[in-house]
Image: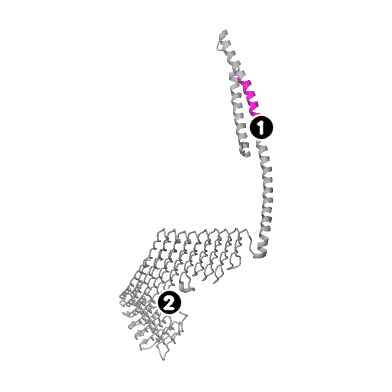
């Protein structure tokens, strides 16, 4: 019996193509009819007339045949179109019938399965045939598959610190369900067991952050492979010191089958960068100078974490007689409180003003107060106060000197050590008789070390006071204050975390099988960079001098402070140890050892702080500019970590 397969849509397309061909031929026949059916004689003789009549008769006969062929062609196209429609109708009818039959069969199948499973569900709470339901609530295990046929359900993921649900077990024939992923800090769920007769174990769930991977499910008692272990979760800052979770152990086979591979270890958390404390404001302002005590008072000392107060401004002395006008000195900056506070700024010097058109009294501006040093760790030095201005008419005027900037404090806060990489999981054993052992999991990479904290910046020097002598020959601007040195960093970079150990390979079956390969070890984490030295404070600008003959002397600019030294970089983490290969069977080689993890790269030494810029000299007869500060020395690079031992 022969069969013919027909596609109605192709038949309809073919009929359209045939109709187009027939139309093209008809147009060509009509075009050729006029010149061929009435051929004119070449001459008036009998032979020419006979030849012309012969050709014309032949063309007329061709046109009659073409008309009959076109009729047959149209009828054929109509039959093809009718056939395409009939086939389409038949296909639609058959499809409807098949859908009805399919629905009936599905209903029968469902009813039949329900009838078969009902007694087992009533007595044992488990069907004979069918897959187990997946876990729904957080951490709920997957349901077991049917007693005869069916896979286990997947375990549900766990909530925070809750393990993932275990995968459901299979029945006689089927594979175990996959374990659910663990919540943060918790292990993944174990994979479900394979069927008693045939089936593979389920894969273990992945560990939550810092959690261990779930173990792979065992394979069937007779034929089936063990499930792979779940991967460990990456380390977190709040769980287990940043250590990555270990990989889950691979499931072992039963009588015949391969062991599951061990899970990979999680990556260790990178160490946190060190940070200096943040100051919480200053303690206020010192008392200003008076006509009784012309010097400003020192700024009040700061409490823990509080910056020192600003020194009080010196008294401004306004003299209309012959006595020298002397401005008071600015107060010293208040001492910084402990815990990384900034030093207080120096107060401004008071102005010396010798007033009156005929005044021959000299005028001297008060010196600015010095800024206080910052406190450890990393406090910045206070800025120096500006020198007071000096103004007189006929005598010499001398601007006050700017106060020096306070020194930046050292910082001794190292970067945190990187977390340990998680160990790889052990490979599962092959079947008791026949089967290869599972490969060990790869160890996790150690976390990178954190960077050390930076030294405190030096305070800027105060500007020198100006000297103004409109009717005299000479005035001297005050010199700028020296910038404070930047604090050195003693905060070394954190060491990189060691790499995780590779998992051991599983043993082969006792008769035939290869041992599992040992897992590769994780690399050590890179060391953190050392803290940078604090930048030096800028020198204060020299004061300007103004006199009638432009013979004044501008103040010298202050020298910039030196930059602080950088700290050493952290050491690279040691590489992890390689996993051992599993033993082979009676016939079969042992597994090879994994590769040892390479040591981490040492951290870079901290950069030395930049020296402060020198202050500019005062104008008129320009003062000498200050020298820039020296840059600090860079710290030494950390040593690389050692490679792990070979398994």
Front-lying residue, 16 or 586: 586
Q: Secondary structure at mark 2?
A: loop
Classed neighbour count for the residue bearing mark 1: other residues with Cα under 10 Å, few (<14), some (14–19), many (≥20): few
Q: Which residue is mark 1?
A: 79
Q: Quadrant of the C terminus?
A: bottom left
Question: Vertically, is 95 above or below 584?
Answer: above
Q: Can residue 40 be seen in the rendering of this structure?
A: no
Q: Which mark is residue 276?
A: 2
How is colour applied across the structure in the image? one colour
Q: Nearer the viewer, residue 634 or 199?
A: 199
Q: Looking at the image, tell me whether mark 1 or mark 2 is earlier in sequence order.
A: 1
Q: Please state the horizontal and vertical placement of residue 476, each as a whole percent of the image.
A: 32, 80
Q: Quadrant of residue 529?
A: bottom left
Dividing the picture into quadrants, the one containing residue 138 is bottom right
Instruction: Find residue 438 and report its horizontal and vertical position in percent.
Output: 46, 61
Dot 1 falls on a residue whose secondary structure is helix
Q: Is residue 458 visible?
A: yes
User: With 265 as the anchor, is 608 left or right in this view?
Assistant: left
Q: Residue 68's x, y, as percent?
A: 64, 23
The quadrant in which the N terminus is found is top right
**Residue furthest to the bottom:** 292
> Could you classify mark 2 by the number of other residues whose Cα lies within 10 Å: few (under 14), some (14-19), or many (20 or more)?
many
Give the spatial CA distance, label 1 vs label 2.
Answer: 93 Å
Q: Looking at the image, do the residues carrying marks 1 and 2 touch, with CB atoms under 8 Å apart? A: no
Q: Which residues are magenta?
A: 62-75
Q: Main secondary structure of the magenta part?
A: helix
């Amino acid at each position: 019996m022969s069969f013919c397969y027909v596609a109605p849509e192709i038949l309809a397309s073919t009929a359209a193509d045939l109709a187009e061909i027939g139309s093209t031929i008809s147009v060509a026949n009509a075009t050729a009819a006029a010149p061929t059916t009435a051929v004119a004689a070449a001459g008036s003789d009998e032979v020419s007339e006979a030849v012309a009549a012969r050709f014309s008769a032949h063309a007329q006969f061709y046109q009659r045949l073409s008309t009959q062929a076109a009729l047959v062609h149209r009828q054929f196209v109509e039959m093809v179109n009718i056939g395409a429609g009939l086939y389409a109708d038949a296909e639609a009818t058959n499809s409807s019938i098949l859908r009805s039959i399919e629905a009936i069969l599905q209903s029968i199948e469902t009813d039949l399965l329900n009838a078969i499973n009902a007694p087992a569900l009533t007595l044992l709470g488990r069907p004979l045939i069918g897959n187990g339901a997946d876990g729904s609530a957080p951490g709920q295990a997957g349901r077991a598959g049917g007693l005869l046929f069916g896979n286990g359900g997947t375990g549900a993921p766990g909530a925070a610190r809750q393990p993932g649900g275990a995968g459901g077990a299979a029945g006689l024939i089927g594979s175990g369900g996959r374990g659910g992923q663990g919540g943060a800090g918790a292990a993944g769920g174990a994979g479900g067991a394979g069927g008693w007769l045939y089936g593979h174990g389920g894969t273990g769930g992945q560990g939550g952050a810092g959690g261990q991977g779930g173990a792979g499910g065992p394979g069937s008692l007779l034929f089936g492979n063990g499930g792979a272990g779940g991967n460990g979760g990456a380390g977190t800052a709040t769980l287990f010191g940043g250590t990555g979770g270990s990989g889950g152990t691979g499931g072992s086979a039963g009588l015949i089958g391969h062991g599951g591979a061990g899970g990979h270890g999680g990556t260790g958390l990178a160490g946190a960068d060190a940070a200096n404390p943040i100051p919480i404001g200053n303690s206020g302002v010192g008392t200003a100078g008076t006509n009784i005590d012309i010097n400003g008072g020192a700024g009040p000392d700061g409490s823990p974490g509080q910056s020192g107060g600003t020194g009080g401004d010196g008294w401004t002395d306004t003299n209309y007689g012959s006595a020298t006008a002397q401005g008071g000195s600015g107060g010293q900056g208040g001492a910084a409180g402990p815990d990384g506070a900034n030093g207080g700024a120096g107060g401004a010097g008071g102005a010396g003003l010798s007033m009156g058109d005929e005044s021959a009294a000299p005028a001297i501006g008060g010196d600015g107060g010095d800024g206080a040093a910052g406190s450890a760790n990393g406090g910045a030095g206070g800025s120096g106060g500006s020198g007071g201005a000096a103004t007189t008419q006929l005598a010499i005027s001398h601007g006050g000197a700017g106060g020096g900037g306070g020194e930046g404090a050292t910082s001794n806060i190292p970067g945190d050590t990187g977390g340990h990489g998680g160990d790889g999981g052990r490979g599962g054993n092959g079947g008791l008789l026949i089967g290869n052992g599972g490969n060990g999991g790869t160890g996790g990479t150690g976390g990178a070390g954190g960077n050390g904290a930076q030294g405190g910046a030096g305070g800027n020097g105060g500007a020198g006071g100006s000297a103004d002598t409109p009717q005299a020959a000479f005035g001297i601007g005050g010199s700028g204050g020296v910038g404070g040195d930047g604090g050195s960093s003693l905060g070394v970079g954190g060491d990189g975390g060691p790499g995780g150990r590779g998992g051991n390979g599983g043993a082969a079956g006792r008769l035939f099988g290869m041992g599992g390969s040992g897992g590769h070890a994780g690399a050590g984490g890179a060391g953190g960079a050392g803290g940078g030295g604090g930048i030096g404070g800028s020198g204060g600008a020299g004061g300007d001098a103004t006199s009638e003959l432009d013979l004044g002397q501008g103040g010298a600019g202050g020298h910039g402070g030196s930059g602080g030294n950088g700290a050493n970089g952290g050491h690279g983490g040691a590489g992890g140890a390689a996993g051992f290969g599993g033993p082979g069977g009676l016939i079969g080689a042992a597994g090879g050892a994994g590769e040892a993890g390479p040591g981490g790269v040492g951290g870079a030494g901290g950069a030395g702080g930049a020296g402060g810029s020198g202050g500019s000299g005062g104008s008129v007869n320009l003062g000498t500019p200050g020298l820039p500060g020296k840059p600090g020395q860079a710290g030494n690079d950390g040593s690389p970590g050692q490679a792990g031992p070979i398994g």
